[in-house]
C-alpha cells in the first residue's frame, strides 16, 4: 500500500474563555444547567461523571458535568462540523475539512494536528480501543485511516471506494466501517488489510455496532443485519415494519432501535423477537442513549426517558425554553445526570431518572 503525504500543522491556540454563557434556575423544568457553545447541533458528547467534552463550530469544550462551567476551551480555528473522541488522556477532534487535532484532556493544551489525506474531504467520525496503539477515523471520500496517537503519524489507510458518513467501530484486532453503498468492511487494526466484506444489498447503511462477536448494521430500509465479526458470515436478519431507522444501540443481549419519527423498540438479539415498542415521541435524528434503567431519546422540545424493562415513558423533560430545541444529540448518561445538546447550539443536563 502506497503511503500518501500526510502533513502536520503548527500548534493551534488554546483559548480559556470565549463567548460562553451559562444559565441556571431551570429546575422546575428538570434542567440542571445549560450553556451555549455554538449555533448548531454540537457533536456527540463524550466524557465521565466529572467532565464532558463537546465539539461545536471550531472549538472543543471541557465542561464540568455537575455545573456546565467550562474548564477549558480549545479554539482550533478549523472548519465546522467537529467530531470528538476521548482516548486515554487525550481528546481528538475531527473537522469537516481540516483534519484531526489531539488535545490534552486535562489541560486543553495542543499536542498535534494533521491535515486530511484529501484536502477536499473531511472527518466523519473517530474511534479507538484500549488494546490498540492507534486512533482511527473515516473520511467522506470512503477512506479509513489509522494514526499514531502520540504524534499523528500515518500508520495506514484503506480506500473503500464508497462514502463513509459515520465513524469506525474498533475492537482489539479489527476496525469495522460501513459504506453508504451498503458494504460492511472488517480491516485488520494493525495493518489496515481487509479481512472480509459483507454486502447488505441496501443503500444508506448506518454506523455498525459490535458486541459479543457479532457486528450489527442497519440500513434505513427497516432491516437489521447480524454478521459474524471474525469471518463476515451472515447470522441473521431482523425486519421491522417501519423504515427510516437510526443506527442500532446494543446493550448486552438486546438492541434499541429508534426511527426518525421517534419510535423506539427493544429487540432480543438471541431470539430476534420484539420485546416492546414505544411510539410517538416525535422526530429524532440520532440513536438513543442507554442508562442502567432507562433509555433516553430527544424529540421536538423534549428529552424522553423510557423504561428498559417495560417500554413505558417514565420521564419527559421539556426543553422548549432552550432556544431552538428542535432536535437533540444522543444523550450521554452518567451516574447522576443525562447530558445532551440541541440544534440551537446548547448543551444541557437533566437529573437521571
Image (spheres, grey):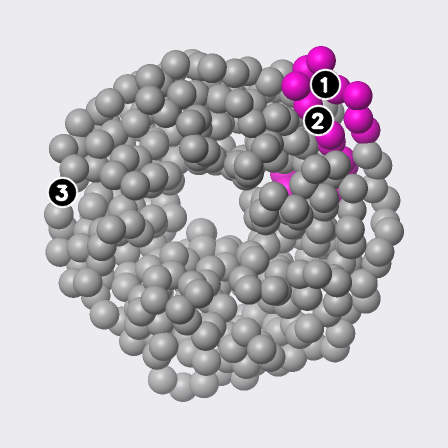
Verify CB contact (< 8 Å) between mark 3 and mark 1. Answer: no
- Percent coordinates x, y for residue 265 in the rendering: 32, 24
Mark 2 residue element: loop
Label 2 environment density (alpha carbons within 10 Å; few <14, some 14–19, many ≥20): many
Whether residue 201 sits left or right of residue 244 in the image: it is left
**Element assignment for label 3:** strand
Q: Residue at x 71, y 26 (%)?
A: 32
* Side (left or right) of 271 relative to 298: left
Identify the mark at residue 286; answer none if there is no mark: none
| Identity of the residue drawn at 39% across and 35% down | 246
Gap between marks 2 and 3 measured at Cα: 43 Å
Q: Which residues are magenta?
A: 23-42
Q: Which residue is mark 3?
A: 236
Q: Which residue is mark 1?
A: 27
Cβ–Cβ under 8 Å for marks 1 and 2: yes
Which of the two labelled residues, at mark 2 and mark 3, occupies the earlier sequence position? 2
**Residue 31 image position (x, y, % from top left):** 68, 23
Relative to residue 283, is residue 149 depicted above or below? below
Who comes first in sequence, dot 3 or dot 1? 1
What residue did someone put label 2 on?
32
Amino acid at each position: 500500500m502506497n503511503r500518501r503525504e500526510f502533513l502536520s500543522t503548527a500548534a493551534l491556540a488554546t483559548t480559556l474563555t470565549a463567548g460562553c454563557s451559562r444559565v441556571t434556575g431551570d429546575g422546575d423544568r428538570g434542567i440542571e444547567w445549560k450553556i451555549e457553545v455554538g449555533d448548531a447541533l454540537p457533536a456527540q458528547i463524550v466524557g465521565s461523571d466529572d467532565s464532558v467534552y463537546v465539539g461545536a463550530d471550531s472549538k472543543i469544550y471541557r465542561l464540568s458535568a455537575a455545573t456546565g462551567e467550562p474548564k477549558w476551551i480549545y479554539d482550533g480555528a478549523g472548519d465546522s462540523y467537529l467530531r470528538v473522541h476521548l482516548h486515554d488522556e487525550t481528546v481528538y477532534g475531527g473537522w469537516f475539512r481540516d483534519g484531526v487535532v489531539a488535545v490534552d484532556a486535562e489541560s486543553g493544551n495542543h499536542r498535534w494536528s494533521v491535515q486530511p489525506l484529501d484536502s477536499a474531504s473531511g472527518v466523519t467520525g473517530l474511534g479507538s480501543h484500549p488494546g490498540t496503539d492507534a486512533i482511527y477515523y473515516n473520511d467522506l471520500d470512503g477512506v479509513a485511516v489509522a494514526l499514531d496517537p502520540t504524534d499523528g503519524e500515518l500508520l495506514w489507510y484503506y480506500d473503500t471506494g464508497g462514502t463513509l458518513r459515520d465513524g469506525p467501530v474498533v475492537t482489539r484486532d479489527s476496525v469495522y466501517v460501513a459504506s453508504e453503498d451498503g458494504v460492511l468492511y472488517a480491516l485488520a487494526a494493525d495493518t489496515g488489510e481487509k479481512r472480509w466484506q459483507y454486502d447488505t444489498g441496501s443503500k444508506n447503511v448506518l454506523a455498525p455496532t459490535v458486541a459479543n462477536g457479532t457486528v450489527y448494521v442497519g440500513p434505513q430500509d427497516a432491516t437489521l443485519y447480524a454478521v459474524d465479526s471474525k469471518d463476515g458470515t451472515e447470522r441473521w436478519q431482523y425486519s421491522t415494519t417501519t423504515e427510516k431507522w437510526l443506527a442500532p444501540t446494543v446493550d448486552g443481549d438486546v438492541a434499541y432501535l429508534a426511527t426518525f419519527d421517534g419510535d423506539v423498540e427493544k429487540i432480543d438479539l438471541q431470539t430476534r423477537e420484539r420485546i416492546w415498542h414505544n411510539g410517538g415521541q416525535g422526530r429524532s435524528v440520532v440513536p438513543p442513549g442507554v442508562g442502567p434503567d432507562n433509555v433516553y431519546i430527544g424529540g421536538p422540545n423534549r428529552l424522553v426517558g423510557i423504561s428498559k424493562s417495560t417500554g413505558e415513558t417514565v420521564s419527559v423533560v421539556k426543553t422548549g425554553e432552550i432556544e431552538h430545541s428542535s432536535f437533540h444529540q444522543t444523550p450521554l448518561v452518567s451516574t447522576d445526570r443525562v447530558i445532551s445538546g440541541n440544534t440551537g447550539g446548547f448543551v444541557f443536563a437533566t437529573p437521571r431518572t
